[in-house]
């Protein structure tokens, strides 16, 4: 279809076809931007030539350690240079990168290491004790652990595992990268936050990531040599693919281990940061900072993770930040919609502008289609009131869930990826999330499964029934709030319940409030969570 009648000699060959991969960006940058700053972290400065050499050494060291194409290499690292190096080095040896959330509990990390069959793991010294507990809980063979100390942050090595720099020097700086033969080859494995219990492993391919790195500069109007502050966790959608994108622009990645308002302002003032991304919690940090640093340039930022409050957008706009709302999921490599600004809106009041900026917007240029549909997969009326589900199709959609064909088939039903996020669509096509399906709680940009928390709660001997919903929080956007119905004659208090859950869940998943009451139910016994969500919004009771 669509071919000319005579295509003799018009086939693919080495001269006219190369599989798309973000690895190509760093290979080019090592030549074109060799002397420019690629990575900055405290007093550490690395050029693109250095960056490429270390990536090559790491890729070679991984091969010498027994990593073969298709193997999984995990990382448990904050936003430090080693995480950026791994982003390129792991696929450069043909392996699949699995960046693991540093905030997870040992049991969940053990599940991920087992499920992904990680061959090797790079682990920051701060998180090494937690990972070793996870290793003890694994059912399958344990990965080789390489410890990554952080001298810049004063996090010394514990010495029980092989040191990262020693491991790196075992590699060949002239190692020939193993480039993908097919752009559909797996590049990364990213686990969801377990919105239905066990986390699912979304598999990315080289083509999707490459197109993310090309579409983002168009939408964000990115210049050459931007200075990008790594606020988005690199374990979350691989930092929205921005690490893979920066070499294409000769940009500088300014690493940020601890995300605080002081560190953000210092980076802007001292390192001339021009761009960064972050969840609404980061915006709140900036707005509510007790101390600020002066800067004379406009700083542009993407925000995603939960709809930001219009009041927050208004306040941060007055501080020298230009905010754009984007939206996406782990399964879509990160952001796939954007709130494109219409110059006609410049005459609106500040509050009206902020309300529009809080919308999730329209499809990025690298995405084929994103829209809102009803249960029959029909387009909902674009009236700003009719709810439906956000669905999308295009290259930046995962290959599927690892070892879970049933969930993959369900997610791709009807030829679109189903986000399970409920939204309305306005007359101009702009989408706006109105609710979260399956009662997902988004705390600090991380998804929390109410089902998982409820499951942990039911282990308490005094709990008869429970339900967990989102409670608004000034710092985190949302936090879990537990409603508990006790067994007859049983007793428990809030502190006891929270302490019980801290031993079973990651800290950020533990409810910050517990309310004891009879739970509202339908005639069939189903708990009416919408009533509990309304109660959670009320001021705390004494």
Image: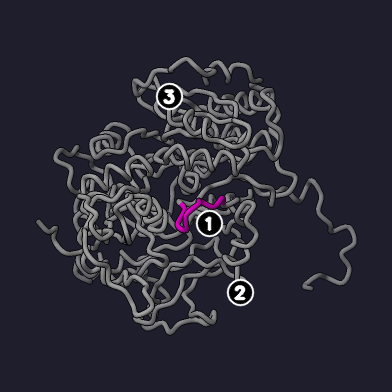
Q: Earlier in the sequence, mark 2 or mark 3?
A: 3
| Image location of residue 220, percent across then percent down | 42, 55
The residue singled out by tag 1 in the image is 331
Is residue 195 a member of the stretch shown in magenta?
A: yes
Residue drawn 47% across the image and 25% down it: 46
Q: Secondary structure at mark 3?
A: helix
Q: CA distance from mark 2 to mark 1?
A: 17 Å
Q: Earlier in the sequence, mark 1 or mark 3?
A: 3
Quarter of the image with the N terminus is bottom right
Task: State which region is magenta.
Answer: 194-201
Quick one: 386 or 35, which is closer to the camera? 386
Quick one: 17 or 131, which is closer to the camera? 131
Residue neighbourhood size for the residue with mark 1, other residues' Cα within 10 Å, grouped as few (<14), some (14–19), many (≥20)? many
Q: Which mark is residue 125?
A: 3
Q: Earlier in the sequence, mark 2 or mark 1?
A: 1
Residue drawn 38% across the image and 66% down it: 436
Q: Main secondary structure of the magenta part?
A: loop
Whether residue 304 can be seen here:
no
The correct choice, above or below, for 324 with respect to 25 in the image is: below
Q: Secondary structure at mark 1?
A: helix
The correct choice, above or below, for 468 with respect to 4 in the image is: above
Quick one: 240 or 113, which is closer to the camera? 113
Image quadrant of residue 225? Answer: top left
Whether residues under marks 1 and 3 lie with C-beta atoms below 8 angstroms apart, the answer is no
Indicate which label's residue lies in the foreground, 1 or 3: 3
Residue neighbourhood size for the residue with mark 2, other residues' Cα within 10 Å, grouped as few (<14), some (14–19), many (≥20)? few
| Image location of residue 40, percent across then percent down | 41, 29
Q: Which mark is residue 414?
A: 2
Q: Which mark is residue 166?
A: none
Q: CA distance from mark 1 to mark 3?
A: 29 Å
């Amino acid at each position: 279809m669509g071919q000319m009648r005579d295509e003799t000699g018009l086939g693919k060959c080495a001269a006219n076809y190369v599989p798309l991969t973000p690895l190509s960006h760093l290979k080019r940058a090592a030549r074109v931007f060799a002397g420019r700053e690629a990575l900055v972290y405290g007093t550490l400065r690395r050029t693109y030539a250095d960056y490429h050499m270390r990536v090559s050494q790491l890729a070679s060291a991984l091969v010498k350690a027994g990593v073969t194409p298709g193997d999984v290499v995990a990382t448990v690292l904050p936003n430090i240079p080693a995480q950026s190096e791994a982003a390129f080095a792991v696929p450069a040896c043909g392996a699949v990168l699995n960046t693991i959330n540093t905030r997870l509990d040992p049991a969940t990390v053990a599940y991920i290491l087992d499920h992904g069959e990680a061959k090797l793991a790079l682990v920051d010294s701060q998180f090494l004790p937690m990972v070793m507990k996870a290793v003890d809980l694994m059912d399958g063979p344990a990965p080789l652990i390489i410890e990554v100390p952080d001298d810049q942050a004063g996090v010394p090595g514990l010495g029980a595992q092989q040191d990262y720099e020693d491991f790196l020097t075992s590699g060949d700086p002239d190692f020939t990268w193993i480039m993908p033969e097919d752009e559909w080859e797996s590049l990364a494995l990213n686990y969801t936050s377990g919105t239905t219990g066990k986390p699912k492993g979304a598999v990315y391919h080289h083509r999707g990531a490459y197109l993310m790195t090309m579409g983002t500069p168009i939408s964000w109007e990115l210049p050459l040599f931007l200075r990008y502050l790594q606020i988005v966790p690199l374990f979350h959608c691989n930092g929205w693919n921005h690490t893979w994108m920066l070499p294409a622009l000769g940009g500088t990645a300014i690493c940020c281990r601890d995300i605080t308002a002081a560190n953000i302002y210092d980076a802007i003032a001292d390192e001339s940061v021009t761009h960064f991304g972050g969840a609404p919690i980061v915006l709140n940090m900036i707005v509510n900072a007790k101390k600020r640093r002066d800067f004379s340039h406009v700083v542009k930022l993407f925000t995603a993770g939960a709809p930001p409050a219009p009041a927050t957008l208004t306040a941060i706009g007055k501080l020298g930040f230009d905010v754009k709302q984007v939206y996406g999921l782990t399964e879509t490599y990160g952001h796939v919609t954007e709130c494109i600004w219409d110059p006609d809106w410049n005459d609106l009041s500040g509050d009206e502008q902020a309300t529009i900026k809080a919308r999730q917007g329209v499809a990025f240029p690298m995405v084929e289609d994103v829209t809102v549909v009803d249960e029959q997969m029909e387009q909902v009326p674009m009236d700003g009131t009719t709810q439906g589900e956000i669905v999308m199709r295009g290259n930046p959609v995962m290959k599927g869930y690892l070892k879970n064909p049933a969930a993959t088939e369900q997610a791709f039903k009807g030829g679109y990826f189903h986000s399970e996020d409920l939204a309305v669509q306005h007359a101009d096509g702009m989408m706006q999330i109105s609710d979260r399906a399956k009662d997902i709680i988004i705390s600090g940009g991380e998804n929390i499964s109410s089902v998982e928390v409820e499951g942990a709660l039911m282990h308490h001997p005094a709990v008869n029934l429970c339900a967990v919903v989102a409670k608004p929080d000034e710092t985190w956007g949302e936090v879990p709030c537990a409603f508990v119905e006790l067994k007859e004659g049983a007793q428990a208090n809030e502190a006891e319940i929270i302490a019980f859950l801290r031993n079973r869940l990651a800290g950020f998943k533990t409810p910050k409030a517990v309310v004891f009451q009879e739970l509202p139910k339908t005639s069939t016994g189903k708990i009416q969570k919408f009533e509990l969500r309304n109660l959670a919004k009320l001021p705390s009771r004494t």
